[in-house]
């Protein structure tokens, strides 16, 4: 019996319990009525009288040890649970972190800002709610111009007119009024037009306006700057061409096309088999506009340009429908993670 007591003593001493199930096993094995210690007490009855004293002592000590061990195990488990440490499986794979991605409009916007800031252009911002003077009058729009019509512009109030700006060119007016040449700035922002929503047009979109004013600024400066921009933006082999156009606030005015990034000028679906894509409007700031904004047109000249972000991003990423930009569908937005600057 002594050997048995020794064996159970060392078993109990080395017992570890990492959960409630093991604690219960311990109780059943050593402390229950049918447990091993109780069995020893039963067997004790047959022990000859001369051994009783010694064995009785050891047996009682064993019983005490088992109870103490049980209490100790139970309280350690409870502390673990209440401090919530529990069992930590360090080999478990970590949960995947869901990283967001930039919206394609922001990607293109940031890239354009980056390209122009490298050649000294600052960023200026203006309000989305404008008055007639900054959006139209100062920019030489005649009274009867169709853009001033309710069909094309969202008016918030009439007489005096308050409207949602139809282009970011209103910011060039604000910059010219508030500072003096040399001026070299770009103005990114949201613009609004009362247009039916379709795959190619939306009532909300984004533009970046550019403005450069100094002494002796010529059309050659405009062309060279935009050529630099096109190559930085679309790759070193990009070619540009300028087509005559009309804007009330520039004279002469032009549209700039770039060689199609997809077919490199050979002709494809994206460029409608012309090999060229229109990406911006531009021109020399009309002297009337300079004078209206407090800049002496006999001393200074300048150029301006306006880039439509949605259309540009559509050609860059081959996006077929402008509405996708505004729907916030993650399946669409996630595709541009790898296209970061
Ligand atoms: N404001 C024009 C538009 O919304 C874009 C534009 C064209 C801006 C020529 C300019 C410019 O500054 O010179 O269509």
Image (cartoon, grey):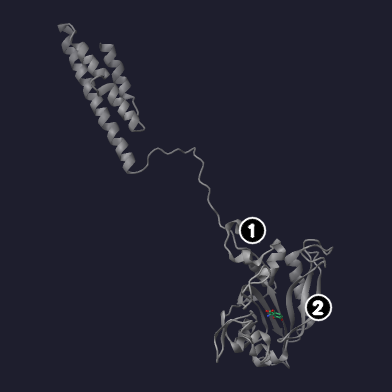
Label 2: few (<14), some (14–19) or many (≥20) C-alpha neighbours in 10 Å? few
The relative height of residue 304 versus residue 20 in the rendered view (above or below) is below
Identity of the residue drawn at 74% across and 79% down = 282
Provide the secondary structure element on which disc 1 rests.
helix
Q: Secondary structure at mark 2?
A: strand
User: Which quarter of the rendered picture does the C terminus lie within?
Assistant: bottom right
Write the residue at 30% across / 23% down: 12
Give the quadrant of residue 23.
top left
Image height check: is 100 above or below 128? above
Left or right relative to 58: residue 155: right
> Which residue in the protein does label 1 denote?
336
Q: Position of residue 280 (x, y in %)?
A: 73, 75
The image shows a total of numbered marks equal to 2
**Given the current orientation, which residue lies at the most extreme right position?**
266
Of residue 276 and residue 289, the one placed in the foreground of this image is 276
Q: List x then y, in percent, for residue 288.
A: 70, 92
Q: Residue 54: x percent and y percent?
A: 18, 13
Residues marked 1 and 2 touching at CB (< 8 Å): no
Front residue (pair 14, 230):
230
To which quarter of the image does residue 276 belong?
bottom right
Q: Is mark 2 within 8 Å of ligand 1?
A: no
Of residues 32 and 267, the one drawn nearer to the viewer in this rendering: 267
Q: Tell me the quadrant of ligand 1.
A: bottom right
Q: Is residue 195 above or below residue 75?
A: below
Query: Which part of the image, by quadrant, shows the N terminus?
Result: top left
State which tag comes first along the sequence, 1 or 2: 2
**Residue density around tag 1, few if under 14, some if 14–19, many if 20 or more, within 10 Å:** some
Q: Position of residue 77 (x, y in %)?
A: 32, 36
Spatial CA span between label 1 and label 2: 32 Å
**Badge 2 is on which residue?**
243
Residue nearest the viewer, comparing 292 with 299: 292
């Amino acid at each position: 019996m002594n050997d048995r007591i020794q064996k159970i003593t060392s078993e109990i001493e080395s017992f570890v319990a990492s959960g409630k199930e093991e604690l219960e096993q311990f109780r059943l094995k050593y402390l229950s009525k049918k447990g091993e210690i109780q069995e020893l007490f039963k067997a004790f009855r047959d022990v000859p009288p001369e051994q009783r004293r010694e064995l009785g002592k050891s047996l009682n000590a064993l019983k005490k040890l088992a109870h103490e061990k049980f209490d100790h195990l139970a309280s350690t488990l409870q502390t673990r649970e209440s401090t919530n440490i529990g069992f930590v499986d360090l080999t478990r794979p970590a949960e995947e972190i869901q990283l967001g991605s930039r919206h394609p409009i922001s990607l293109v916007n940031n890239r354009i800002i980056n390209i122009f800031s490298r050649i000294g252009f600052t960023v200026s911002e203006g309000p989305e709610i404008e008055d007639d003077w900054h959006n139209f009058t100062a920019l030489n729009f005649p009274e009867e111009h169709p853009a001033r019509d309710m069909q094309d512009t969202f008016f918030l109030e009439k007489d005096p007119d308050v409207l949602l700006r139809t282009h970011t060119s209103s910011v060039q007016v604000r910059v010219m009024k508030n500072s003096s040449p040399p001026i070299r700035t770009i103005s990114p922002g949201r613009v609004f037009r009362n247009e039916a929503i379709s795959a190619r047009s939306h009532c909300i979109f984004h533009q970046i306006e550019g403005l450069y004013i100094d002494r002796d600024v010529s059309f050659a400066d405009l062309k060279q700057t935009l050529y630099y921009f096109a190559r930085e933006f679309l790759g070193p082999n990009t070619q540009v061409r300028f087509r005559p156009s009309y804007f009330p606030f520039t004279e002469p005015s032009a549209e700039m096309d770039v060689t199609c990034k997809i077919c490199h000028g050979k002709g494809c679906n994206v460029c409608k088999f012309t090999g060229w894509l229109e990406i911006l409007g531009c021109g020399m700031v009309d002297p009337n506009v300079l004078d209206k904004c407090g800049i002496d047109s006999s001393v200074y000249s300048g150029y301006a340009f306006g880039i439509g972000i949605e259309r540009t991003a559509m050609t860059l990423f081959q996006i077929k429908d402008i509405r996708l930009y505004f729907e916030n569908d993650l399946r669409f937005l996630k595709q541009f993670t790898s296209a970061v600057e």
